[in-house]
Amino acid sequence: MKIRSTQAILECLLEQGVDTVFGYPGGTILNLYDELYRYRDRIRHILTSHEQGASHAADGYARATGKVGVCFATSGPGATNLTTGIATAHLDSSPVVFITCNVSENLLGKDAFQEVDITGIAMPITKATFLVRDPEEIVPVMRQAFVVASSGRPGPVLIDFLKNVTAPSQTVEYAPVPAILQGDRLPEIRALRRRLSAPQPDEGEITRLLEMIRQSERPFLLCGGGVVRGRASAEFLAFAEKLDAPVAITVMGGGGIAGDHRLSTGMIGMHGSHASNTACAECDLLIAVGCRFSDRIATDAATFAQQAKIAQIDIDQSEIDKNILTDLHIVGDAKAVLFALNARMGQMQHTEWKERILSLRPPEEAAQSGGTLAPAQIMDVINRIAPENTIFSTDVGQHQMWAIQSVHFRYPGQLLTSGGFGTMGFGLGAAIGAQAGFPDRRVLHLTGDGCFRMNCNELATVEHYRFPIVTVVFNNGCLGMVRQWQTLIYGKRFSETTLDRGPDFVKLAEAYGLRGYRAATAAEFEAAFRSALDCGSGAVIDAALNMDEMVRPMVAGGSPVTDFLLD
Amino acid sequence: MKKQFDALRKRYTLCILVQDIPGVLSQVARLFSRKGYNIESIVSGATDRPHITRISIEIVADEMMIEQIAAQCRKLLPVLAVKVLDSEGSIHREIALIKVRTEDRDGREEIIQIANIFRAKIIDICKDSLTIAVFGTPVKNDALIDTLSDFSILEIAKSGTLAMERGPGTIYQELRDEE
Ligand SMILES: Cc1ncc(C[n+]2csc(CCOP(=O)(O)OP(=O)(O)O)c2C)c(N)n1
Ligand SMILES: [Mg+2]
């Protein structure tokens, strides 16, 4: 069957079950948007205010739903506006297919209007890039792109179509292949997926790890982003309970195990809890699942888990022995490896060790009432009132750490946060993506005054699509996380971190046609939050905080995880 | 037991089989530049298999670093196989072209004699210059260049080092199994 090349692109999206794309049109991608107009009853396009917003939305959609996100942009500035979003997805292993169009073949390489070598730019921040110069490549490349994005360790892929390839006169041969993701019916696609997928866990390594577990008196388990991306929380839970050991999460691991589980010790690393970081220092066996031991976790690689044998379970061979040397590693999908371990593992018991570590957890006390609004009070209100399955997206800074420390995430995809790249301005786009994927779920966007200023233009998207996203601005009037470092390490020289400026976030919300609230006490915040949840539209709550609030505890980069700079 | 990496910086050759598609060379080279490593030499050329190119990259690095770069290289979509060769287990050859100024007949004779000792070939000759082609290990080629430095060397071009494992083993054993 011969169809238009642009039709082939969209048919390939439908093959993959794509019904939502995020993007922004422009000159070179006009042909594709023209086709999209014909497909508008089958593919919903969400037009953001900025390509960066679209990139984070596609990423947030992917993180929340577990499906591949899709994002369109035009050439030149449209394409370069995606780059922060692509890198954000790359560092957090989020599967997104980015589609851009470039100038026509006859103009390529001539510095034509809005020409940029986006496949070259995106090379270091994607799993693969494709430059499509021949219409006959469209269908195979589209199919490959989805396999690459979703197989093995997931991640972003970029396809750049030359404009002439998308011309209405171009037709390509297309044979429909339904449900390709489920069936992988085409042999070449099946082969590619097999090549890119993790190997089956090695039984010998499983046996060795089980032996190490038997010999261990003080095991400690680490839940990384691989548990979340691999949707392996059920297997992880079973393993943790059999191991009967304290369990910490990384930032990316939030939602991999319920935060209020009896074995849970909270975050590890720079802002890790006393319980997690002490367990790390004192354990004799550390089992890390889907974690690359980044410098925010292993703040000092030389002393990290010094007394322990280290076992690393990871889907990506190149993560093994990269940041931390391991005593044993199992390369494989978290779900498959944990399943294999669980099948052969008996119930362990580490009562004494477990008690010692778990006793270091701070008592769950109610936030103090009254006084000026404190971060703990905001989190307390949110934890009490937000529906249990609420999806949380955060930006980057103190508010991000407060959120991850105090919300008990319960399932993979419930926490959307830029852990690896630390992208300020990620949160609102990500919330939009999550809301598009889960229209019936509550989505909260927790942000800082600095981050919100960066990409608050997406409130227009929130309003236009009637997304009932509630943004909570932790407004401390400063770049709090940077200020915290300045306070503790730079002699309180607050160089360019004070945000004594507009806009008025309440008026801003109203200008976008949304509800705005201001809160300066816990009672005001609770009233505002309740009203925002019920208001039927998107809302922004400007929550006033003291400038000098700090994230506790804190370990400085380069120090052992138990050398707390701040308790 | 934690893996013990040799911390000594040594000369390694990374042999990489790739699909011959645009951009693949820069994709591979980028893995070195992002770590701040200088590539000593890089050679890219055809193999006995259709559409498969072999890239040989010579680099001075410690074992952990070379293993990490190799692991990251294996993840690139167009990369089909990667093999790390150190100088003991493999053979290395390069070609060098050396253009030397010849002042008079005696000088010319002397240069030709030196070239013969090194089994190099004279591939161009005229009144004022001689061009020598030498094929050998980088060590041998450098020795010839060193000897010729008594004369006036006008220009040198080297091919970069090709490497292959000793014995019957091949890089194809590293090929990812395909359907
Ligand atoms: C795009 C970007 N620029 C700069 C930074 C560095 N940075 C990290 S946290 C932070 C402060 C964020 O301020 P705010 O949004 O007010 O959050 P707070 O820490 O006050 O909660 C900055 C500037 C970053 N992570 N991302
Ligand atoms: Mg702030």
Image: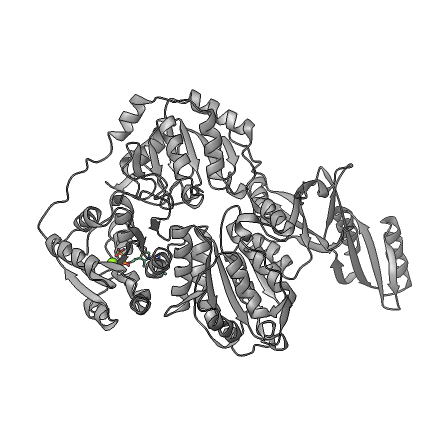
User: Where residue A68 appears, x then y in whole percent?
Assistant: 47, 55
Q: Residue visible at 40% across and 52% down? A: A65
User: Where residue A567 appears, x then y in whole percent?
Assistant: 23, 40
The colouring scheme, among rainbow, by chain, secondary structure or one colour, is: one colour
Pick whichever, A533 or A177, lies toward us.
Answer: A177
Residue A303 to residue A173: above or below:
above
**View quadrant of ligand 2:** bottom left
Pick whichever, B92 or A199, lies toward us.
Answer: A199
Q: Residue visible at 27% across and 49% down? A: A403
Residue A367 to residue A428: above or below:
above
Pick whichever, A56 or B110, lies toward us.
Answer: A56
> In which quadrant is the N terminus of chain A drawn?
bottom right
Kindly give the residue lying farthest to the left in the view shown.
Answer: A370
Residue A20 to residue A411: above or below:
below
For the image shown, how many numbered marks are present on the structure?
Answer: 0
Residue A23 to residue A352: above or below:
below
Q: Is residue A545 at all visible to an observer of this figure?
A: no
User: Where residue A166 appears, x then y in whole percent?
Assistant: 58, 72
Choose top left, top right, bottom left or bottom right for residue B91: top right
Choose top left, top right, bottom left or bottom right for residue A117: bottom right
Q: Is residue A435 left or right of residue A514?
A: right
Q: Is residue B126 at all visible to an observer of this figure?
A: yes
User: Where residue A521 appears, x then y in whole percent?
Assistant: 11, 55
Pick whichever, A423 or A458, lies toward us.
Answer: A458
Q: Is residue A497 left or right of residue B132?
A: left
Kindly give the residue lying farthest to the bottom in the view shown.
Answer: A113
Q: Residue visible at 47% across and 53% down? A: A95
